[in-house]
Image (cartoon, helix red, strand yellow):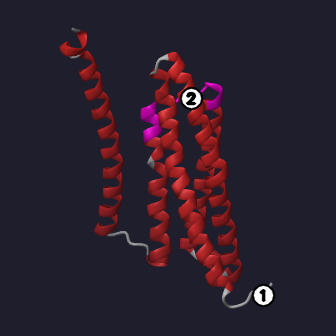
Amino acid sequence: MTFPPEAYLWFKTLHIVGVVVWFAGLFYLVRLFIYHVEAADLEPTVKKAFEEQYTLMERRLANIITTPGMILAVSMAVGLLITQPSWLNQAWMQAKIALVAGLIAYHIFCYRLMGQLNRGECSWSGRQLRALNELPTLFLVLVVMLVVFKNQFPTGAATWLIVGLVLFMAASIQFYARWRRLRLSRQLESPLNNG
């Protein structure tokens, strides 16, 4: 199959757009799951309204933004590989494909969690979902590094510093969420609220 010379640039452009849309959806979808799970602590009538709203938002986000973004990203990646088949023999591309397969599995797992939340059967806590929400960030950093560095993937101190910063950001988000919950519980238990 022969494509015109500009096909590569169109595949690349649409691939990047698809990746941005896909990740935007992945980042926000699990955040909605967190809010959905934490709505269980609300008063029953309010809880029902919030759960219905989160179910609707999750479904729309997954079906209208996240999944189409994934389909666009993956289909344009196939187009890129058709125009550059030699990439399939390179270690960086093989590693990237493995990471993308992991992201697709994560995407499918999000649908599973969405179904469990919709049926009221989700056993994940808000804290566990916050940790899960950090996984695409790690995948994104690794994929971008593979694309930029290709076969000269850095293994020196700078690489470990970047990985450390990503892990620090993830831990900071977890710490902040925990601190916010503790602060709220202290406020609710303060003598002013009991008197």
| Mark 2: secondary structure | helix
Which quarter shows the N terminus? bottom right
Count of all numbered marks drawn on residues in the image = 2
Three-letter amino acid code of the residue under disc 2: Glu
**Lower position in the chain sequence, tag 2 or tag 1:** 1
Which quarter shows the C terminus? top left
Q: Which residues are magenta?
A: 118-130
Q: Report the disc number at residue 127.
A: none
Q: Is residue 155 visible?
A: yes
Report the Cα–Cα distance between label 2 and label 1: 51 Å
Residue at image point 52% right, 23% down: 47
Question: Position of 74 compared to 144: left or right?
Answer: right
Q: Residues within 10 Å of mark 2 (few under 14, many from 20)?
A: many
Quarter occupied by residue 86 = bottom right
Residue at image point 33% right, 51% down: 169
Three-letter amino acid code of the residue under disc 1: Thr
**Residue topped by disc 1:** 2
x and y percentages locating residue 61 in the rendered image: 60, 48
Quarter occupied by residue 157 = bottom left
In this view of the protein, which residue sits in the foreground, 157 or 50?
50
Quarter occupied by residue 7 = bottom right
**Residue topped by disc 2:** 51
Question: Position of 134 compared to 164: left or right?
Answer: right
Check residue 168 for magenta coloring: no
Residue at image point 53% right, 72% down: 92
| Mark 1: secondary structure | loop
Residue closest to the far top: 195
x and y percentages locating residue 106 in the rendered image: 58, 48
Residue at image point 34% right, 44% down: 173
Residue closest to the far left: 191
Check residue 125 for magenta coloring: yes
Q: Is residue 99 visible?
A: no
